[in-house]
Amino acid sequence: MSGNGPNHSARRPTLRRRLQRSAVRQRDLVSRSRRAARWLRPGLVVKRWVLTSGLGLVMALLGAAVWADLKPIYWILESIDWLLGMITQVMPRGITGPLVLVIGAGLVLWGQSRSFSSIQQALAPEKDTLLVDALLAQGRLNRGPSIVAIGGGTGLSTLLSGLKRYSSNLTAIVTVADDGGSSGVLRRELGVQPPGDIRNCLAALAREEPLLTRLFQYRFKAGSGLEGHSFGNLFLSALTAITGNLESAITASSRVLAVQGQVVPATTADVRLWAELENGSRIEGESAIGKATSPIVRLGCIPERPPALPRAIEAIANADLIILGPGSLYTSLLPNLLVPELVTAISRSKAPRLYICNLMTQPGETDGLDVSGHLRAIEAQLATLGVQQRLFTAVLAQEPMGASDSPLLERYRQTGAEPVSCDARELNRQGYEVMQAPLQGARPTATLRHDPRSLAIAVLRFYKKTLRAQ
């Protein structure tokens, strides 16, 4: 007995293991029950069509029965009456009814769950997200506000990558004045509009596999003629040549990347920027303006009044919220306001309009400008088009940053950059609505830039506040 005891003990599950298995089964049952209950939530746009299909099936059967002189209905009713009579003879009605009801409901839920699981396996076998969760999330995104974001550079793509968590009704209106780097080379050698800022926005709004997005953003580090170019820039340039224009190329790229929303160039014209400086000189080209040695007093472009795309005008007309920024003031934001039709559409819109200011000044472009200085530059630019009213009466700025907030401030100061200060009281006195928030985010970063999630939360907080005030 003593020799067989340990083997017998090893074969028999211990009480603890039994309890653990029981607890696992209970948790699994609770999880499945909650998963099944999520199908009952409103907004999935599934239950209504399941019920519609069921109603259609019942009507089709009824039509067939009428066509057959109602005999099938009599047979079915007689069969049901006989079956119910047999069941109630075995078990009381108070037990039979609830039991059959529970079994029927269970079969319906089980059948629907298995059906949707099969659909998910067919459509997205490698994704862990449950279909019901994906439908609920997409429903929330579809109900999100219609937001138009105007700008360019990394600032606009940062904003879009945060907003796409909360709405799928996004439109990015992007400047096409870039003439430096890979975009500048492609613009000069192929005669295409600069694709760089558009590429960044497409990648920011992409819902496709991360590997495909990384491919779109990949920049060649070697190769004669390839070094410095990004794959996305080459892709967009090739599609522009194939389709005949950049707008069609963007539409095709959006389908490839499953873009959430739309990206629209500010104009179809081949725009070249120029700027007049305080010292009286004039410089041309977006890359040269970013390195100006004297304060900029006026910005313009060639051709003088570039046309806007109808899609951009339509998006602004239907917007619930219009945003300008963040981004380089003279090379990413104001070039969009050189398109008169865009300015007219914004002025006619009844949607709240928000300007998002940068965290830091940019040497050669916004030296010494505070938030008020940025706003004065925007108003001065609009005045050159004959627009006297303020297009953006609300501003979102970073809450005050001290030296203890970021060790990077000193390094930025060495390059000539300073935090953009915001005198909220003075701006309120001038008629602006000012909102300040921690836009940099809580996590330490290598650069002082907007955090996508923090920025999106602040924008939506402003939007909800505006709705409550209406």
Image (tube, grey):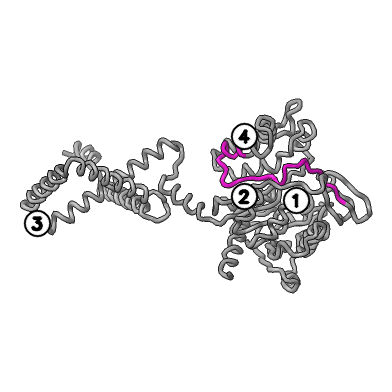
Query: Quadrant location of the N terminus?
Result: top left
The numbered disc on residue 171 is 2
The numbered disc on residue 215 is 4
- Estimate the spatial distance between the alpha carbons at disc 1 and disc 2, rounded to whole Å: 17 Å
Instruction: Give the amino acid at mark 1.
Output: Val
Instruction: Give the amino acid at mark 4.
Output: Leu
Between disc 1 and disc 3, the foreground one is 1
Horizontal side of residue 260 vs 328, given as left or right: left
Q: Which residue is mark 3?
A: 92
The spot of residue 49 in percent (x, y) is 37, 48
- Identify the residue at image location x=74%, y=51%: 336
Instruction: Give the amino acid at mark 3.
Output: Pro
The numbered disc on residue 339 is 1
Of labels 3 and 4, earlier in sequence is 3
Helix, strand or loop at label 1? It is loop
- Estimate the spatial distance between the alpha carbons at disc 1 and disc 3, rounded to whole Å: 79 Å
Give neighbour class at mark 4: few <14, some 14-19, many 20+ (Cα, 10 Å): few
Horizontal side of residue 170 vs 278, given as left or right: left
- Estimate the spatial distance between the alpha carbons at disc 3 and disc 2, rounded to whole Å: 63 Å
- Estimate the spatial distance between the alpha carbons at disc 1 and disc 4, rounded to whole Å: 33 Å
The numbered disc on residue 182 is none
Of labels 3 and 2, earlier in sequence is 3
- Estimate the spatial distance between the alpha carbons at disc 4 and disc 2, rounded to whole Å: 23 Å
Q: Which residues are magenta?
A: 251-275
* Above or below, comparing residue 442 to residue 20 in the picture: below
Of labels 1 and 4, earlier in sequence is 4
Instruction: Give the amino acid at mark 2.
Output: Thr
